[in-house]
Image (cartoon, rainbow, N blue to C red):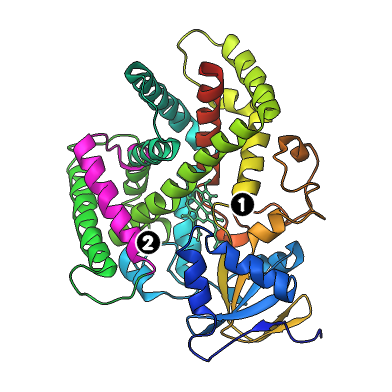
Amino acid sequence: MREDIPGRLGLPLIGETFSFLSATNSTRGCYDFVRLRRLWHGRWFKTRLFGKIHIFIPNPEGARTIFANDFDLFNKGYVKSMADAVGKKSLLCVPVENHKRIRRLLSEPFSMTSLSAFITKFDKMLCGRLQKLEEKGKSFKVLDFSMKMTFDAMCDMLMSITEDSLLRQIEKDCTAVSDAMLSFPVMIPGTRYYKGIMGRKRLMETFRDIIVRRRTGEESPGDFLQSMLQRDSFPDSEKLDDSEIMDNLLTLIIAGQTTTAAAMMWSVKFLHDNRDAQDILRDEQLSLAKIKPEGASLNHEDINNMLYGLKVVKETLRMSNVLLWFPRVALNDCTIEGYEIKKGWHVNIDATCIHYDSDLFKDPLKFNPQRFDEMQKPYSFIPFGSGPRTCLGMNMAKVTMLVFLHRLTSCYT
Ligand code: HEM
């Protein structure tokens, strides 16, 4: 057994919460809190936030221990506001026995082969919007553009919603739900929690109406929702009930929109700052464009041929760390890398620390897609997590980014 994990716990309830909140609400961002403590205490450190002891896990070995024992020794902590906002049947909140079944049933439409139709649809939508922007000739914020694009594309893929006013209402309500997920759960008008719960209510009504229309045969498009409803006559173990479908529709939108949009934005920033990588990417994408008939949309095969593009995507995900760390709670006393962890402690897999470790990634501050020519050490590249909770939408996120990079580099300089 190693010696105690260094760090400061401070007062029993408050601990270092104020320093954490101060970093979070400043331009430094919440990771600055972690960075400073690493400087003071070393790679492994403990702290107390909101009354709970937190350990930040800095290496692939520690990450492996947690991912490999997810649900057995560790689980996501139960957060009441999250379960109220996104729904108790959401993948993010259900207990292990339901998680397995729900995840299995949700997964198929997100497999690489099922995403073929999405690739072509997303490409058409993207080209149309880029063209409109070009015609206007005005500059625009990449993040605003990517947020709207990913949101609209996901609602189309999930439920075939394309009407702009409905999309904007759903987006507003999803943002309210997302804001409420980590808020203080009191139903007082004007609070983030209250707004989130009201937003959720409207969303559930909208989803319910769509499901009713599908069941009466008024509409039956080939989308994610339809693939879930086609299982209506299956045994219980092979289908999702309506509340499971609706909670997870909401979960998928919330888990997929900001993450993918942020990664798209970061890819633009990194390519802007690294002209060499941009040139190599452009050459690859232009040679792909050259062999396609004019005006043809991208397909699955094109995506498979974007070898350098995929490395750009990976390097963007390594450096941007869209999700900085992945939180879990220890369900029992245990050890990680020889350190003693007590039941109830929060252990955070620090993906940012791992992705910037110079022993794992040479020259980690340099944007170098070519580093992915070499195999990575297990659990050293974990932008989508690992184990039973690996990101469900990782293929969708990757193809979305590749289509975006293709149009950006082959149509614009
Ligand atoms: C670049 C974009 C994305 C990144 C970086 C990302 C990252 C992640 C990570 C790290 C996790 C695991 C968190 C943990 O272990 O605690 C996760 C889970 C999840 N992601 Fe993503 N994600 C992205 C896009 C998407 C998309 C597009 C969707 C869906 C359309 C999605 C749906 C989910 C869901 C449902 C989970 C929970 C899985 C479970 O608990 O079983 N994500 N994501």
- CA neighbours of label 1 inside 10 A, class few (<14), some (14 to 19), many (20+): many
User: Where's the N terminus, which quadrant?
Assistant: bottom right
**Element type where label 1 sits in the image:** loop
Q: Position of residue 103 (x, y in %)?
A: 48, 57
Q: Which mark is residue 236?
A: 2
Nearer the observer, 239 or 72: 72
Tell which residue pokes out farthest to the bottom in this image.
12
Q: Nearer the viewer, mark 1 or mark 2?
A: 1
Question: For residue 202, what is the image quadrant?
Answer: bottom left
User: Where's the C terminus, which quadrant?
Assistant: top right
**Vertical order, 248 against 46 (above or below):** above
Tag 1: amino acid: Pro
Left or right? Give the position of 193 relative to 340: left
Whether label 2 lies within 8 Å of ligand 1 gets the answer no
Q: Which residues are magenta?
A: 156-182
Magenta span has 164? Answer: yes
Tell me the residue at 79%/53% (across/down).
360
First in sequence: mark 1 vs mark 2: 2
Nearer the observer, 261 or 310: 261
Tag 2: amino acid: Asp
Whether label 1 lies within 8 Å of ligand 1 gets the answer yes
What residue would you read off at disc 1? Answer: 383
Question: For residue 168, what is the image quadrant?
Answer: top left
Q: Position of residue 344 (x, y in %)?
A: 56, 84
Residue 407 appears in the rendering? yes
Residue 234 appears in the rendering? no
Magenta span has 56? Answer: no
**Element type where label 2 sits in the image:** helix
**Vertical order, 298 against 327 (above or below):** above
Nearer the observer, 314 or 87: 314
